[in-house]
Image (cartoon, helix red, strand yellow):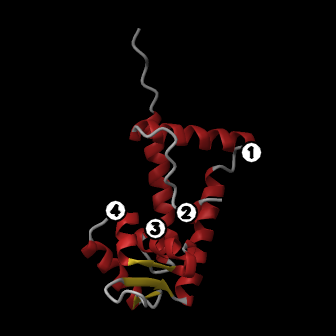
């Protein structure tokens, strides 16, 4: 007997779209894009609030030119600065400014508020179960059982 279509993917897509719409609205208040906010939160979670440009390219899975453009735009906004590594001047480092740290904290609060709204109708046990199921679904799609690549800035 053929299994009926349940619309799992459709609901996941609708939830994703609604979350993206909400995120973009809140990011407009900070004059940021989603990628820019992820960059700020990644740097905020890093030791000494800095990463090398190469580390960021690998973490974000983007080309050097894409990362350079992102860095330049955030630098113009005064949210980060680029420096030469004191031990190896060939290495370019990206560091969060105080304004960048404050903005990243505001972005993180916006995300936490959106996450709370997302699961407001669930009790603690249901939230844990939902998270477990979402991780397993993600792992099955990526054929990487147990892989949890949630950005470090969003981990509890």
Q: Are marks 2 and 4 in contact (CB under 8 Å)?
A: no
Residue pushed farthest top?
1
User: Who is closer to the viewer here, 130 or 17?
Assistant: 130
Q: Are marks 4 and 3 in contact (CB under 8 Å)?
A: no
Q: Which residue is mark 1?
A: 124
- Residue 110 point in image, percent of width and height: 59, 68
Q: CA distance from mark 3 to mark 1?
A: 28 Å
Q: Indicate whether 35 appears above or below 83.
A: above
Q: Under tag 1, what secondary structure?
A: helix
Q: CA distance from mark 4 to mark 3?
A: 22 Å
* Front: mark 4 or 3: 4
Q: CA distance from mark 4 to mark 1?
A: 34 Å
Q: Earlier in the sequence, mark 2 or mark 4?
A: 4
Q: Which residue is mark 2?
A: 152
- Position of 143 with respect to 101 (left or right) is left
- Residue 141 point in image, percent of width and height: 40, 38
Q: Earlier in the sequence, mark 4 or mark 1?
A: 4
Q: Which residue is mark 4?
A: 61
Q: CA distance from mark 2 to mark 3?
A: 21 Å
Residue located at (30% from left, 79% from top):
68
- Position of 100 with respect to 128 (left or right) is left
Q: Which residue is mark 3?
A: 24
Q: Is residue 105 visible?
A: yes
């Amino acid at each position: 007997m053929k299994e009926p279509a349940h619309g799992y993917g459709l609901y996941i897509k609708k939830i994703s779209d609604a979350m993206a719409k909400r995120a973009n609205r809140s990011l407009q208040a900070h004059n940021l894009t989603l990628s820019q906010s992820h960059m700020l939160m990644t740097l905020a979670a890093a030791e000494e609030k800095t990463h090398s440009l190469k580390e960021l390219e690998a973490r974000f899975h983007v080309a050097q030119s894409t990362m350079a453009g992102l860095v330049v735009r955030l630098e113009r906004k005064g949210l980060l600065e680029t420096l030469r590594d004191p031990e190896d001047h060939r290495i370019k480092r990206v560091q969060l400014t105080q304004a960048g740290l404050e903005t990243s904290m505001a972005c993180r609060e916006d995300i936490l508020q959106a996450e709370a709204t997302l699961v407001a109708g669930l009790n603690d046990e249901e939230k844990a179960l939902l998270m477990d199921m979402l991780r397993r679904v993600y792992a099955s799609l990526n054929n990487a059982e147990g892989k949890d690549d949630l950005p470090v800035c969003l981990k509890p």
